[in-house]
Amino acid sequence: MSRKKLGFVAFVATGVGLILSTILKEIDFFMLLPIAAIAGLFYVGLVEHYKELLK
């Protein structure tokens, strides 16, 4: 596995872990809305980064 792919996997694992741990700690619905928005932006960024990684 190349270093770039390994770095991408580490970035994904870190981001997903942080988002999940934040969601599990937050009970308030109004706090979950901004977290969901950030998670959506994180996903969009991952897709774009993955497309560049494949080039």
Image (cartoon, helix red, strand yellow):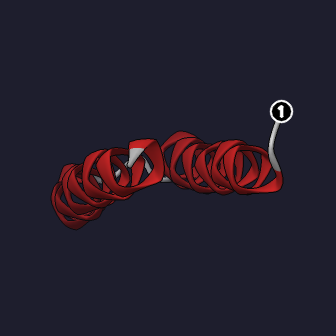
Mark 1 burial class by Cα count in 10 Å: few <14, some 14-19, many 20+: few
Comparing 25 with 51, the one in front is: 51
Left or right of residue 41, residue 46 in this image: right
**Image: 23 above or below 18:** above
* Element type at mark 1: loop
Q: Name the residue under label 1.
A: 1
Q: Quadrant of residue 17?
A: top right
Q: Where is residue 54 in the image (x, y as percent from the top left)?
A: 42, 42
Q: Where is residue 43 in the image (x, y as percent from the top left)?
A: 29, 47
Residue drawn 16% across the image and 57% down it: 33
Left or right of residue 38, residue 33 in this image: left
Left or right of residue 42, residue 1 in this image: right
Residue drawn 17% across the image and 60% down it: 37
Residue drawn 35% across the image and 56% down it: 52
Comparing 25 with 41, the one in front is: 41
Residue drawn 63% across the image and 51% down it: 8
Q: Which amino acid does label 1 sit on?
A: Met
Q: Position of residue 4 (x, y in %)?
A: 70, 56
Q: Where is residue 1 in the image (x, y as percent from the top left)?
A: 83, 33
How many numbered marks does the figure carry? 1
Q: In the displayed orientation, state which residue is furthest to the front.
A: 55
